[in-house]
Structure formats: structure tokens, C-alpha cells
Image (tube, grey):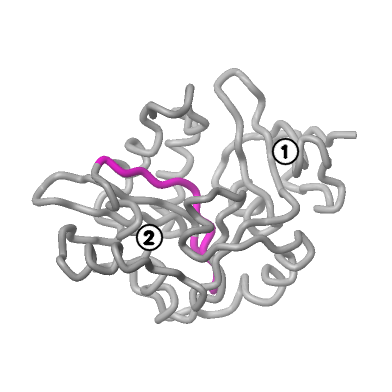
């Protein structure tokens, strides 16, 4: 049975109690307080729901991840990077990035990034836990992504692109930056062909949990000013 969370209890059920159908649904309810979100990522789950639904918490099996050393950069993307078509920054405008990620997209109806979700991650950014990567052309923000950094793990949440290859360049820059800082894994949550083309692959939920146990509290020499 699905576990319903109360506002006063930050405890999540064991990951192996997540449903098989829909894959990975672990719990429902609770809130999006910074404390609960931090507890969720530390536990191995994340929020994903639509407007009008209760908060739904997920831990899919398998889990899509990218090991930094497995990053694949195509010849065409390397050319874009060499030509410096975009200037890439870190944490320069987190609110603008998450707003852009929440904006309607031609290939999807609605968005899971509700105003409540947006504010919750802005709050986490204020605590130095959520971070953004921005791709610019001049003064115009044309692509980027955001996620959560804990220990030597980065939990990717969403990306957007207004110009071809902008989000990919931001992602490659992030991965290389994290690798230099000693990060060992980037959580991509669920499979997409886009992520697979960049080198991401699926691992079991239990293997993902082992990464959490080993690296959540490991020190990393990362600087988010760039």
C-alpha cells in the first residue's frame, strides 16, 4: 500500500516499498519544506506531481545516472563548445532558470514545476543546496539546468533550451566542473534518449542506494561561483 506522509513526520518508507506500477511511486502527501526535501534526496527519492495532485514522491527502479567519466560529447557538440557560442555561468540567476524550466513546452502539456515547487527550490538555493547552470548569448538566457548538490552527488532536476544545443553545453560544463571537484555521480532520475546520448545509463535502485550510503556525506571541493 502507498504510504501517506503527515506534515509533522519527515520519515520516508524504505525504498523497496516503492510501487512497481507506477514504477517508483514511494509515498504521497507531506509538504515541500526545505527539511523534507533534504530528507527526500538523502533517502533516495524526489517529488514529482502535477497541479491539483498531492505531493508524490518517487524512487524509480532502474535509476538513470551519469558517471562523470562516462560523459559522451558528440563531434558536433564539441564544435559548438569550441566556437564558444554560449557563455556558461554557475548560480548566476537560479530563479530565472527554474522559471524557464517551468514554462510551457511545445511537446508537453502542463508542467510539474508548480509555483510551490519553484519557491521550494529557490529556498534550497538560498541555503546553498540547489544550484543552477546558465547558458547565455549576450545578455539573453537561452538554456540551463538546476539540481541539488549533496556530498559528492548531484541530483539533476530539469533543464531547458531556447537555442539549439544550449542546454547540452550547460550540462557538459556542469559535468566537467563536478568531475574536477570529485563528484562521482549525477542523478538523472528517469530514462530519456537525450540523456542516454550524453552517456547516462540505468542502474538498479539498490546500486543507487549504495552511492547514497558512500558519498552523501563525502567532502567535495566544488566552487559554484564562475
Read off the residue under disc 1: 8
| Residue sticking out furthest to the left | 138
Relative to 189, 7 lies left or right: right
| Residue sticking out furthest to the front | 75
Read off the residue under disc 2: 171
* Quarter where residue 2 is shown: top right
Work out whether residue 18 or residue 42 is closer to the camera in this orientation and state it: 18
Q: Residue at x 60, y 52 (%)?
A: 189
- Where 183 sits versus 148, above or below? below
| Label 1 environment density (alpha carbons within 10 Å; few <14, some 14–19, many ≥20) | few
Work out whether residue 210 or residue 4 is closer to the camera in this orientation and state it: 210
Could you tell me how many numbered marks the image carries? 2
Marks 2 and 1 sit apart, C-alpha to C-alpha, by 36 Å
Question: Residues in magenta?
Answer: 149-162
* Quarter where residue 24 is shown: top right
Q: Quadrant of the N terminus?
A: top right
* Quarter where residue 85 is shown: bottom left
In percent of width and height, residue 31 lies at 62, 35
Secondary structure beneath label 2: helix
| Residue sticking out furthest to the right | 1
- Where 173 sits versus 160, above or below? below
Relative to 119, 201 lies left or right: right
Q: Residue at x 59, y 47 (%)?
A: 37
Work out whether residue 60 or residue 14 is closer to the camera in this orientation and state it: 60
Amino acid at each position: 500500500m502507498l504510504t501517506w506522509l503527515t506534515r509533522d513526520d519527515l520519515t520516508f518508507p524504505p525504498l523497496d516499498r516503492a510501487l512497481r506500477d507506477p514504477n517508483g511511486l514511494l509515498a504521497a502527501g507531506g509538504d515541500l519544506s526545505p527539511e523534507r526535501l533534504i530528507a527526500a534526496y538523502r533517502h533516495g527519492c524526489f517529488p514529482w506531481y502535477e497541479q491539483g495532485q498531492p505531493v508524490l514522491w518517487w524512487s524509480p527502479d532502474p535509476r538513470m545516472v551519469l558517471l562523470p567519466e562516462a560523459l559522451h560529447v558528440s563531434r558536433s557538440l564539441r564544435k559548438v563548445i569550441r566556437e564558444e557560442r554560449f557563455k556558461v555561468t554557475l548560480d548566476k540567476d537560479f530563479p530565472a532558470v527554474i522559471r524557464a524550466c517551468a514554462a510551457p513546452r511545445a511537446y508537453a502539456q502542463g508542467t510539474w514545476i508548480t509555483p510551490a515547487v519553484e519557491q521550494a527550490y529557490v529556498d534550497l538555493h538560498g541555503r546553498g543546496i540547489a544550484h543552477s547552470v546558465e547558458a547565455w548569448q549576450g545578455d539573453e538566457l537561452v538554456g540551463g539546468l538546476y539540481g541539488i548538490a549533496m556530498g559528492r552527488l548531484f541530483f539533476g532536476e530539469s533543464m531547458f533550451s531556447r537555442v539549439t544545443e544550449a542546454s547540452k553545453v550547460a550540462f557538459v560544463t556542469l559535468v566537467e566542473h563536478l568531475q574536477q571537484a570529485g563528484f562521482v555521480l549525477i542523478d538523472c532520475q528517469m530514462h530519456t534518449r537525450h540523456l542516454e546520448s550524453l552517456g547516462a545509463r540505468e542502474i538498479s535502485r539498490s546500486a543507487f542506494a549504495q552511492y547514497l550510503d558512500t558519498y552523501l556525506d563525502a567532502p567535495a571541493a566544488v566552487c559554484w561561483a564562475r
